[in-house]
Image (cartoon, rainbow, N blue to C red):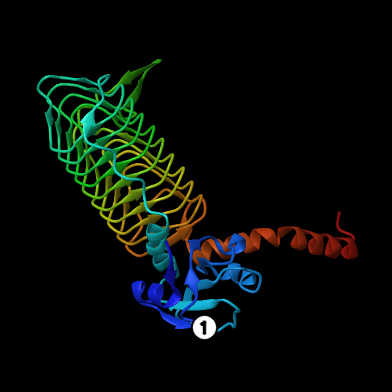
């Protein structure tokens, strides 16, 4: 599969500097690109590779003004443009043919939509409704009363506990468990009492949930993941958490019970959000932050405990200056004869 640089520029709504007739035969990252490859420059720290790359063309930001031997395609967002070309040069595998593997165990009253794919050793309990075009990978478990919308995909080893509701075009990756009991325990004298977890998990349309995540059912109400939200691998969502539309939660982050995240929030890797908090829309929580209080819409916070990002940076700078300050104090004490 080949395209010229000019053709690619048309597809990504870009502008060409260099030879528009250069033929592109493949796609690669900038540091390992070979002759004929298309690559991109999305992060300024990779600019050093621009003079070394063997790529035939590079997708760059529209304000880029550094000379290069390769043809340049200037676009508003290089990552999105390159992503569209990835889909062209490396298309996803063909959808498996509809059908039910003979080893699947499916209750008699399960409703299956058209063109469903059900893989080996799948177990589907009674009163389940599965929409059209759904793909269910090997060894998936789907509990009683689950609802799955159209064109959703469950990769191998996904577990959906009873009463879970999945929207349309949802993708859940391998090993993720949706709807298990929340961590509802209360100390009573010398023992620990379990509080029944009787709610559900509801996942809206176009959500993606990475591998080995855990999303707990609500205690009374529902745990709810809003439309278009993307959740990375190894994320924990506790009982009764509400996550708004189009949020991003990066790997190893966790949200404790009954916290609410409005739409458009970015939660970076290894963030911990305490329970019963409210995070305003479009807030950004930097990596490894510990959020212990409500955060206003649009806030950028970092650190432990989380605080406004600029304050956290100043605090870190002050901490790093402590050894120098101690040495200066010691020198003054020595001059004054203070022990």
In the image, residue 206 lies at what x, y percent?
A: 25, 50
Instruction: Identify whether 153 is placed above or below 12.
Output: above
In the image, residue 21 lies at what x, y percent?
A: 46, 79
Q: Mark 1 points at which residue?
A: 18
In the image, residue 195 lies at what x, y percent?
A: 27, 23
- Measuring 50% from the left and 53% from the top, which residue is drawn there? 287
Q: Of residues 306 and 10, which is closer to you in this image? A: 10
The quadrant of the image that shows the N terminus is bottom left
Name the quadrant containing residue 331: bottom right
Q: Of residues 204 and 196, which is closer to you in this image? A: 204
Q: Of residues 180 and 185, which is closer to you in this image? A: 180
Can the viewer see residue 142 in this picture? yes
Q: Is residue 63 left or right of residue 224?
A: right
Name the quadrant containing residue 156: top left
Give the number of callouts.
1
- Measuring 29% from the left and 38% from the top, which residue is drawn there? 96
- Measuring 30% from the left and 51% from the top, which residue is drawn there? 229
Name the quadrant containing residue 125: top left
Can the viewer see residue 76 in this picture? no
- Measuring 38% from the left and 74% from the top, which residue is drawn there? 7
Instruction: Identify whether 167 is placed above or below 124.
Output: below
Residue density around tag 1, few if under 14, some if 14–19, many if 20 or more, within 10 Å: some
In the image, residue 106 lies at what x, y percent?
A: 19, 21
Kindly state the secondary structure of the residue where label 1 is placed: loop
Instruction: Identify whether 1 is placed above or below 109.
Output: below
């Amino acid at each position: 599969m080949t395209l010229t640089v000019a053709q690619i520029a048309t597809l990504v709504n870009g502008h060409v500097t260099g030879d528009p007739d250069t033929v592109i035969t493949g796609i690669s990252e900038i540091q390992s690109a070979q002759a004929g490859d298309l690559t991109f420059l999305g992060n300024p720290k990779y600019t050093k590779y621009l003079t070394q790359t063997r790529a035939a063309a590079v997708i760059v930001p529209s304000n880029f003004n550094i000379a290069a031997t390769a043809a340049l395609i200037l676009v508003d967002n290089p990552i999105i443009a390159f992503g569209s070309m990835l889909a062209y040069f490396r298309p996803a595998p063909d959808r498996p043919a509809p059908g039910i593997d003979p080893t699947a165990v499916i209750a008699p009253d399960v409703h299956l939509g058209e063109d469903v794919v059900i893989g080996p050793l799948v177990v589907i309990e009674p009163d389940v409704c599965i929409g059209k075009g759904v793909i269910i990978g090997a060894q998936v478990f789907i509990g009683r009363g689950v609802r799955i919308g159209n064109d959703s995909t469950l990769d191998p080893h996904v577990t959906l506990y009873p009463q879970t509701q999945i929207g349309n075009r949802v993708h859940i990756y391998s090993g993720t468990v949706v709807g298990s009991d929340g961590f509802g325990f209360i100390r009573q004298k010398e023992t620990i009492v379990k509080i029944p977890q009787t709610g559900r998990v509801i996942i809206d349309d176009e959500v993606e949930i990475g591998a080995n995540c855990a999303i707990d059912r609500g205690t009374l109400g529902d745990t709810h993941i809003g439309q278009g939200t993307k959740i990375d691998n190894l994320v924990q969502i506790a009982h009764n958490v509400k996550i708004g539309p189009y949020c991003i939660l990066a790997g190893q982050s966790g949200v404790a019970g009954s916290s609410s995240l409005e739409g458009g929030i970015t939660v970076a890797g290894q963030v911990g959000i305490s329970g019963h908090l409210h995070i305003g829309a479009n807030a950004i929580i930097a990596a490894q932050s510990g959020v212990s209080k409500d955060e206003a819409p649009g806030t950028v916070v970092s650190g432990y405990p989380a605080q406004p990002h600029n304050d956290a940076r100043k605090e870190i700078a002050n901490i790093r200056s402590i050894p120098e300050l101690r040495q200066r104090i010691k020198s003054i004490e020595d001059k004054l004869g203070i022990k």
